[in-house]
Amino acid sequence: MRKSFLLYFVVAALAVGTATGYVVRAAAVLVPGTYYIDLGRAIKGDPRLEAQFAMAMKPLQTRYQELKAEAKKLNTEKDQLAIMDPATAEYRSLSMHLKIREETVKGEQDLLMQAQRSIDDEFLFMASSSIHKAVEKLGAEKGYESIVVAPISLKAVPWDNPAQAMELLRQRSTYWIHPDRDVTDELIAILAQ
């Protein structure tokens, strides 16, 4: 008797919903398994994010090229110094001048590397916000059970080289995910909307 009452209630609710224009939606069916996105590929796949990143990095790249040219010029001057007589005052003066310039270039290159890491971190934080929203939307639309960020590298562990293997394993929280579980392209499509 109780089963028939429950069945009657469900049929009546569907009939009322259909008659009144309300659509009864079924609960999302979860697709079992773990899916993943490649964060770097997702950022590069969104032209807006990639353009913002390129714009932020452009001054650093310009200065890096200038420092590279300065380092090349210093090497040429070192070659000239090598053929000079080390006992002369001119040699000592030029040698000290080159060392100072060398240290300055090296110090600025180090600062550029720190600035690049800082921009990378800031950009990753900014991009992660829009990517997180897109991941939530993708998961809800497709009914995915879970979506994780891919390990830094999915390449094979070099077991024959213990030092490299340990370094790679330290960077991972996941040993392996089937390539068919990569939903980065689906995420990029959502980001492009």
Image (cartoon, rainbow, N blue to C red):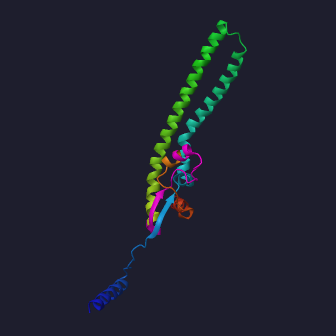
The stretch drawn in magenta includes residue 152: yes
Where's residue 98, x and y in %? 62, 18
Q: Residue furthest right?
A: 83
Whether residue 67 is visible to the viewer of this picture, yes or no, is yes
The stretch drawn in magenta includes residue 108: no
Q: Residue at x 58, y 26 (%)?
A: 105
Whether residue 134 is visible to the viewer of this picture, yes or no, is no
Q: Residue at x 49, y 62 (%)?
A: 35
Q: Total of numbered circles in the picture?
A: 0
Q: Residue furthest top?
A: 88
Where's residue 23, x and y in %? 39, 79
Where's residue 144, x and y in %? 46, 67
Looking at the picture, does residue 133 appear above or below residue 142? above
Q: Residue at x 56, y 23 (%)?
A: 104
Looking at the picture, does residue 104 appear above or below residue 89? below
* The N terminus sits in image quarter: bottom left
Who is closer to the viewer here, 33 or 168?
Answer: 168
Q: Is residue 140 left or right of residue 77?
A: left
Where's residue 76, x and y in %? 70, 22
Highlighted magenta segment, given as a residue range: 140-166
Q: Residue at x 43, y 52 (%)?
A: 129
Q: Quadrant of residue 6?
A: bottom left
Q: Quadrant of residue 162?
A: top right
Looking at the picture, does residue 83 appear above or below residue 110? above
Q: Is residue 176 left or right of residue 145?
A: right
